[in-house]
Image: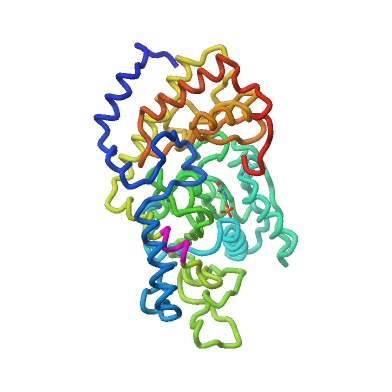
Amino acid sequence: MHTEAAVTREKVVQRDREDPLAALREHFDLPPDLRYFDGNSLGPLQPASRERVHDTVARQWGQDLIQSWNQHAWIDLPRKVGGKIARLIGAEPSEVVVADSTSVNLFKLLAAALALNPGRTVILSEASQFPTDLYMAQGLATMAAAKPSLRLVERRELLSAIDRDVAVLSLSHVDFKTGELADLSAITAAAHERGALVLWDLSHSAGAMEIELDGAGVDLAVGCTYKFLNGGPGAPAYVYVARRHHEQARSPLWGWFGHRTPFAFDTDYQPAAGIDRFQCGTPPVLSLAALDSALDVFEGMDLGALRLKSTALGDLFLELVEQRCQDQGLEIACPTDSRRRGSQVALRHPAGYPIMQALIERRVVGDFRTPDILRFGLCPLYQRYLDVWDAVETLRQILAERSWDKERFHHRSAVT
Ligand SMILES: *Cc1c(COP(=O)(O)O)cnc(C)c1O
């Protein structure tokens, strides 16, 4: 990357002054001295969510108890919150429901996809895919009667690997390590031409860019809500099933919340109409309350403007790394072309782990992905251009002083 003139701190501060999204930061409760680059792993708390959870616990649970399912419409939360997410992913509210975890939803939708495409038994995916997406497919392959199998290829071989055996492609919209953004509509169209369905995992894209699932003719999708959607630790995930599949698609997990009439307590399972059949058991009300409130920050928001700031933050990050961290053994691991990059920057360094720990000690929080990736999530809702400046400046100092090479930075925690 060649830059005409060096970026200065003053210019960066100026960009924050001119940022039309700057005021959104006030919705979040971030420690003032923290430079937070891990919103793609755990989005920060909004005071509104804290109050909502407090009210749900103290008043609804505490005082109104069981009546709250009706009185405070707890029972409607999976669809209500699904409806809010629908707008962010280009779907109809009736196509999205919140339930279970992303892992469990992958299982449900992969099983549904195999049944929707009879005669084909292969789940096609990429070796670089997030592990749980692969594990759920591997587990399914051991148990389903149709004896499905998982085939893994590299991205460049993906389209040529879609033969007559492939029932479904299971892919991430954004690669969790490199941040590479897949061409969702082109891949979906190519899969359909070859008779395969497509299941997209939107965990690393929804809430950071425009997504048009209906527009692209996507069949199935899942995604996390505790990353860019800021739902809180362990918040439940969502399921998208295109309306044209609603009649046929079946969840393999026949829980009573996916029953046509849960409170009839019938002996036999009958799937609910539409997307509701992809619910399973009792929804996690406290987490749903936090998520419901967290999503309000997106109301009426122009997702194009979010994407614009996200790519600008990423471009600035990479430009500063090029300018200020030369000859330090850093490599850029994400696409430099912002059109092919999700909402994160990924750098490679053989000492990636201790470098990230040294950054964290200096209050610049990103994360590390094995074997050598330093990952910096970019969240246009609350990040400032100055945060990017500070992060790269701290990184520059740590590398120049080799201050990462200390005993305490080499100790690996359970969560990296
Ligand atoms: C974060 C993430 C998950 C997480 O799944 P959980 O069931 O919530 O633990 C799954 N897939 C992808 C692609 C992710 O980025």
Say if residue 82 shows up in the picture.
no
Say if residue 244 shows up in the picture.
yes
Position of residue 95 relative to residue 368, above or below, is below
Position of residue 143 relative to residue 9, above or below, is below
Q: Position of residue 30 (x, y in %)?
A: 40, 42
Name the residue at 30% across, 20% down: 11
Left or right position of 26 against 396: left
Q: Nearer the viewer, residue 138 or 194?
A: 138
Position of residue 297 relative to residue 83, above or below, is above
Viewport quadrant of the N terminus: top left
Magenta stretch: helix, strand or loop mostly:
helix
Q: How is the image coloured?
A: rainbow
Name the residue at 38% across, 71% down: 59
Q: Position of residue 282 (x, y in %)?
A: 53, 72
Q: Nearer the viewer, residue 167 or 49?
A: 49
Q: Nearer the viewer, residue 394 or 187?
A: 394
Q: What range is drawn magenta here? A: 286-291
Name the residue at 61% across, 65% down: 115
Total marks drawn? 0
Viewport quadrant of the C terminus: top right
Position of residue 118 relative to residue 32, above or below, is below
Q: Position of residue 293 (x, y in %)?
A: 37, 58
Magenta span contains residue 287: yes
Q: Position of residue 250 (x, y in %)?
A: 56, 70
Name the residue at 66% across, 40% down: 413
Magenta span contains residue 101: no
